[in-house]
Image (cartoon, rainbow, N blue to C red):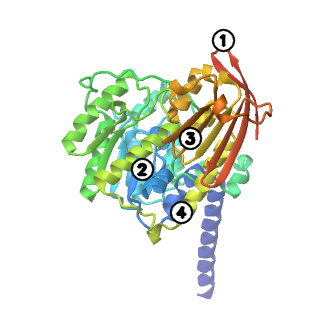
Amino acid sequence: MKKKIKRLVSCVVTVCLTAVFLSALTNLTERKASDQKYADFFSQKADFDVLFMGTSHVLNAVFPMELWHDYGIVSYNFGGHGNEVATTYWVMENALEQTTPKVVVIDCLAVEKQQKSSEVFSFLHLSLDAFPLNLTKIKAVWDLLDDPVTEQRIAEGKAVKSKSSEPRTKIGLLWDFAVYHSRWNDLGREDFVPAPSLEKGAESRIAVARGKLDRIPRDQKMKPGTTGERYLRKMIEDCQRRGIDVILTYLPFPAEKYRQKTANYIYDVAEEYGVDYLNFLDLDVIDYQTDLYDEASHLNPSGARKITDYFGHWLTEHYGIPDRREDAEYASWHGDYDQYAAMKNRNLTERKDLYEYLMLLKGDDLEIRMDIRNGDLFRDEWILDQLANLGVDRDSLSPETSSISIRNRGRDVEIKGLAESGPSEEDGADLQIDVWRGEDQIDSARFSYGYDPETRHIAVSSVER
């Protein structure tokens, strides 16, 4: 009898140790993107007031830390690369297992599509890996991989190419060690000491592109009955059953006609359910000359800060979302914002591209002083667009302009000519920009450049700090 007990105990211990060992290996070898994206979400015990759901358009367009700093709104960005509406539905369902928000904002991009999940399987990992294994996650995986449309596209070679050769399997999403155990050769420092994400699920994309939206009439709409629409309705209905307010949105980008037809159709869906719909294709919020990361779709931080500020006003005025900045339960957000502000400082001080530099100044709480020693700066229309984005009156600029001072997010601008500003220290630079956040000077950048008549743009030859 004692021998049997010893064998039983030995088996139990072996199983437990094996489970612990495999769990440790899984944590080590799995890609950290999903954990990093959701780390702040899972670490917070108190509820979030607002959740933003959708695609990479949301990921790059709404900054929760700016909502916190300016409005005291506690929110999280669940936008994911390539998320179809069905994927967004299951991300929301898993998120609502962890928190009870007052408002869920749903991005309606891709409602016209029949697919359930992205053809790039790593995007599904980003959206789902970090969520704990439970019945809701199992249902999500079973549903999302029951996707004949995506499978057909892959079989016909029409799918978006993925860098990974990983098979689309349920076990790969439910127990990611089945996928990641082969990553031994790829392990790096970030696997042992993962870099934290400082943006509460959002992602800043730093670049500048120019685009144009040719808006079609509102009466041109998509045909109803798609898979995307079905899951959008499921999201709205589940939130309403739970007593959660819903805001539908369509974020701004140079949308193709078929996308605009979707945006037009969502007005009907919003009216049917009695929910608000913020269609930014019809709202004059961003500038398509300064606020795009790429020509096709995404916003850079200048555009994102404008969209974020619009949501801040809307949520405060129409939904009474409380200001949590004095709430002890959310005291850690002050320290989180300090780290976020430090990240923004680094993003600025690492820039060598003048267009990107000027773009990053928009919408931030900065004091800016520009000393201009080469009037060719004002021959570049794109530079003039960027300065106008900062609140500078283009008509007041000339080759004789020698300094520009901007305070309080572009609301206070002072421009001086050469005679007014007096002589400046000559150090060989064509443009010097000094930037302060509060009382702290965060950058002093000296740009040397020349005007290229062929491209009609400024070509920066060097940057000194």
- Secondary structure of the residue carrying tag 3 is strand
Q: Name the residue rendered at 43%, 26% in the picture.
A: 254
Are the residues at dot 2 and dot 3 in contact (C-beta closer than 8 Å)?
A: no
Label 1 crowding class (10 Å Cα cut-off): few <14, some 14-19, many 20+?
few
Are the residues at dot 1 and dot 4 in contact (C-beta closer than 8 Å)?
A: no
State the separation of the CA atoms marked 4 and 3: 26 Å
State the separation of the CA atoms marked 3 and 1: 31 Å
Answer with mark 1 or mark 4, whichever residue precedes in sequence.
4
Q: Which residue position holds label 1? A: 454
User: Which is nearer the eye, 24 or 365?
Assistant: 365
Q: Position of residue 302 (x, y in %)?
A: 52, 38
Label 2 crowding class (10 Å Cα cut-off): few <14, some 14-19, many 20+?
many
Nearest-to-viewer mark from 2 and 3: 3
Q: Is residue 18 above or below residue 258?
A: below
Q: Quadrant of the N terminus?
A: bottom right
Q: Position of residue 411 (x, y in %)?
A: 48, 42
Answer with mark 4 or mark 2, whichever residue precedes in sequence.
2
Answer with mark 2 or mark 3, whichever residue precedes in sequence.
2
State the separation of the CA atoms marked 2 and 3: 42 Å
Q: Quadrant of residue 54?
A: top left
Q: Quadrant of the C terminus?
A: top right
- Secondary structure of the residue carrying tag 1 is loop
Q: Is residue 253 above or below residue 55?
A: above
Q: Which residue position holds label 4? A: 334
Of the residues shown, which amino acid type is indicated by label 3?
Ile
Answer with mark 4 or mark 3, whichever residue precedes in sequence.
4
Q: Which residue position holds label 2? A: 91
Q: Which residue position holds label 3? A: 406
How many numbered discs? 4
User: Which is nearer the eye, 47 or 402?
Assistant: 402
Q: Is residue 427 above or below residue 103?
A: above
